[in-house]
Amino acid sequence: MFPFGMAAAILSILTLGVGIPLVQGASLADIPEGQWAALNSTVNGRLYAAAPISRPCFPNAGSNVTGNTDEGECEAVMQHYMDPETRSNTFGAFMNTEWETCQATSEQCLLDFTNPANPAAFSPPEVCAQGSVPRYYIDVSEPADVQAAFAFARSTGVPLTIKNSGHDYSGRSSGADTLSLWITYVPSFVPEGCDASKTAAAVTFGAGVTQGALYDFADAHNITLPGGGERSVAAAGGYLQVSPDPWQEIIYGILMTAAAVVLREEAIDRALQVKVVVPTGEYLTANACQNTDLFFALRGGGGGTFGVVMEATTRALPQTPLPTVLVQLSGTQSMERELLDFLATNAINYAQTGWGGVIAPGTGMVFTNPLINMSQAAAEMASLEAFATNQLNTTFSLTLQPTFLSLFNEFLLPNGVPVGLPFLATSRLIPADNFQTDSKREELLDNLIPVLDSALPLIFAVAPYYFKDDGETSVTPAWRNSIWHVTASTFWNYDTTLEQKREIYANASSNMDALRDITPHSGAYFNEADVHEPNFETSFWGDNYDRLLQIKQKYDPDHLLDCWQCGRFEHFYHARARLGFLLWVTVTAKYHHEAGVSLDKHTLFAALEKVVYAHPVLACRLQATGTSHTTPPVWVRLPFVDLNKLVEFRDEDSAQLETILETLYAAPAPSVDDVPPWKLLVLQDGTLVFAYEHTIGDGQSGMAFHSALLSALREASLSSVAEHSGILSKFPTDVALIPPLEDRMDVSVPFTMLVRELSKGLLPTWLRKEVTAWTGNPVPDAPTYGMSVHLLHYSPEDAKQLLQLSRSHKTTLTGTLHTLALMVLSGLIRKLPDADEYTSVPMVVPISLRRYTNTPPIAFCNHVSAYSAIHPLLPADKGSDATISADNFPWDLAADLSATLKQEAPYSGRTIGLLKYLSGKYDEYLLGKLGKKRDAALELSNVGSFPKVDKIQPEGPTEETNLDDTWRIEQVYFAQANPTLGMALTVNVAGAESGSLGVSICWSKSALDEAFGQEFLAGFKAGLHGLLGSRPS
Ligand SMILES: Cc1cc2nc3c(=O)[nH]c(=O)nc-3n(C[C@H](O)[C@H](O)[C@H](O)COP(=O)(O)OP(=O)(O)OC[C@H]3O[C@@H](n4cnc5c(N)ncnc54)[C@H](O)[C@@H]3O)c2cc1C
């Protein structure tokens, strides 16, 4: 039964080490019950809540974990804990149990694989946690189920995962807080003409069919359907989608050789067909004649990426007897090197004559060849026999295996890779070049032997080399030149600590470096690769990567199958920061303690711990994913956050704040991999400068930071903090990143707006209005740094008066300040020597969209857009040249602006929607602005009043709490810097909790002459004093 009461959402963690990609979709808890019920009814009641397989053994379970303790069920789980069939048939189980585990926190529900009955793993205080087992799944029975899931994901933002047998070594089939599609689809298992006399027989099977079922079926029908070494792997799941793979190529390749030679079949007969529901909702057939791009992508592009495969058709091969050679070693180091040396010397010859198989270092080798009969095999392997018996003094046997299944049962099945434990693999393809000469082979063995010192080293020999690329597979072309595929693996247990796991991952990854170094143009096998594979795009797909990306964009334009990517806005900000255009956003607040207590390091760290745990984005960075910058980066959660690296205690106080900010803006922010993109400067008088990249939040997010910090400081428990190391790692699992803007509101662009925006680029320059607009000095030819920063502070009384004045004239503070800036600027432009050339001033006002995305002011996100307009220069009689006062102020203009902003706000998300039409080409777009006219003269950004300080909660209703107010914030300043491409001037406004108002006026040194900026500052200040009448601060 499907339970509708849901607990909080958890972060999805897909990999560990340098960083952990996060799901950035909607929190499951946000989805109204009615929507779940509707989905459940659409999929005919096949929507289920999932629990980890070991749940029945644990008396204690997390509040969001369904299921109960049950002794009988626990007994069964223990008995079959390492059985692949059981794991494949249980939704809450994955073959490698690190993918049932939340890798950032180690929260899990695992047994001790060395002794599943060991109570230490599951008795209190151990708690069964959901880990990265998806919370809900649909048992997929028909294409319509998948279509319903895509529609649901699109409308709710809930991220999807696809699980078939759960073998994925990189955890791509699990994911916390996701809705999973469990592929158990087995339509009628129809052989299409499987009469062995027909040479091009084919078999169609559903995506839930296992390889073992295919082997049995084939054997019973005198055909061969070769596959991998593990029966429970799904035949049309992730395995097929990275075809050709080593096992398949070894066996399949060899059999194909037989087919080609003996039966005279040509490559075209290998045509394979895949039926797939793509994220756009269509159910498509992909083969060599239709949807060929999808067909190409599905053959090598990777599972779970282009759609959900429902069924596949593969060509059936005739049954072929297999002469098979076995050499067994007793396992000394020198024998291993000698045997490898012999095999490496003969590797190219074997590859060319149809021999292939598996070399298990230290144990021996199994090779087979379907092209020849026993006597030919004996002749061809005579040298190996002589070498094994005379030089290695070991056993050699040559037997005839009547069918593929007998080969599989005899040699592969008993030596299967273990499951039910945390296990990782790494991989490298060794090209023929590395076998060509004595010195090359020497180099290969010198580098290979240390790599083989792993838990389960294996070398798969030969087959991809035999078959040249038919242009229909998207796997890296390096496959075709490779003679050996080397894998090395390692494992650990339920009680391995997070630190130890990190080390295991790092060592496993660097262990393969020796082979990477001597095969610089090669790659790795996607399905058995290091989760931290360096340059993975090239390594897995080589030159096919860019084409795959285009196909991905075509079939999954909304990225439903890679929900962990960031939103368009974050991608855009990321590009701006990466190119050195966008510097820190800062929100500075001056903290004051009633009793004069100063903010010591440990109290601050304890408070920051609460803030970071409440806002997961503060422990994340955006990480690029592709060689091309058009690919959206992914959110990566850092395994830990070291506050000592982020918090700087300074000798200065707020009197030097302008200089401190100018110094921050004198250079681009350094990009450091192991720290999130923010920092906190602590000044002597309690002033805290929170500086952050725009990728993690808009201006209001800086206010949210101080609101959360104030709340944390006010919690009584903090008053007695003795010591804090500054290391944060136990991130809560029940808070998610705030979804990107486009997932929370409609940002689609009406056609008329699109045409208008496009026409801006098409119109001749002399026809465009901006030609006569003043926007300061043009954008320089290269990124530039250096800002002038000036801070103005207005008391709560002044702020109140300005607000009242604005309200009484039917405008807002933003309307008033914007109009004042326009007046001052108009006056200055009119005094310029080339004043005649200008008739207008383009201005920009950012608009918060949080009220439309239902996101409170205390959240971290980029839910902001902007209103832009080109204003005619104000005439001198509008007061700009005279002393400004409330009496001569153009209130009508201010009221008009406020009304326009109010009217435009609900639609201003469309500006962000326009980003879609850049197709991720933000670098080109931004670099294209160098040397051109600036977009606008002025940006006026008002982040509003200080958010209500409540108990920290990133989203949702705030709780009534009894926080004391010993800590207060007296002043707040908001500042931002986009010195290269930004507006000539920015005026930023923020309210403090005390009610005071902070205004920062900033200009890029390259955009404005200092004298002009100073005159603007003086004019703006004087204007505000004029408006305040008798009450200047
Ligand atoms: C014990 C063990 C032995 C293995 N032996 C071999 C071997 O001999 N040869 C070999 O080449 N590989 C082997 N592998 C690797 C295996 O082939 C891959 O892990 C493969 O991706 C498993 O596919 P699956 O669909 O069964 O698994 P899953 O983990 O369920 O899925 C793997 C990936 O494919 C996606 N996917 C699954 N079904 C579909 C579908 N219907 N449509 C779209 N996407 C889907 C998933 O989202 C995920 O990204 C082995 C792995 C293990 C753990």
Image (cartoon, rainbow, N blue to C red):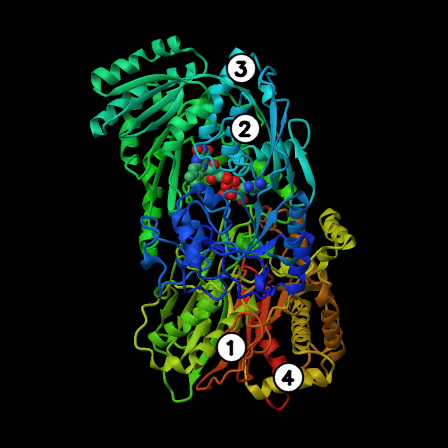
Spatial CA span between label 2 and label 4: 82 Å
Spatial CA span between label 4 and label 1: 17 Å
- Where residue 690 sits in the image (x, y, percent)? 46, 69
Badge 2 density bin: few <14, some 14–19, many ≥20, Cα 10 Å = some
Image marks 2 and 3: residues in contact by CB distance under 8 Å: no
Q: Which disc, if any, is residue 972?
A: 1
Residue at the image position 76 percent from the left and 77 percent from the top: 892
Badge 3 density bin: few <14, some 14–19, many ≥20, Cα 10 Å = some
- Residue kind at label 2, given as amino acid type: Phe
Q: Residue furthest bottom?
A: 1030
Spatial CA span between label 3 and label 4: 86 Å
Q: Is mark 3 within 8 Å of ligand 1?
A: no
Q: Is residue 600 left or right of residue 554?
A: left
Spatial CA span between label 1 and label 2: 73 Å
Badge 1 density bin: few <14, some 14–19, many ≥20, Cα 10 Å = many
Q: Which residue is mark 4?
A: 802
Residue 156 picture quarter? bottom right
Q: Pick whichever, 118 or 97, lies toward us.
A: 118
- Residue kind at label 4, given as amino acid type: Leu
- Where residue 697 sits in the image (x, y, percent)? 54, 64
- Where residue 117 sits in the image (x, y, percent)? 34, 53
Instruction: Tell me: residue 198, above or below residue 618.
Output: above
Q: Secondary structure at mark 3?
A: helix
Q: Is residue 1011 left or right of residue 483?
A: right
Select label 3 or label 4 by which is in front. Answer: 3
Q: Which residue is mark 3?
A: 260
Select label 2 or label 3 by which is in front. Answer: 2
Q: Quadrant of the C terminus?
A: bottom right
Spatial CA span between label 1 and label 3: 76 Å
Q: Is residue 685 left or right of residue 926?
A: left
- Residue kind at label 3, given as amino acid type: Ala
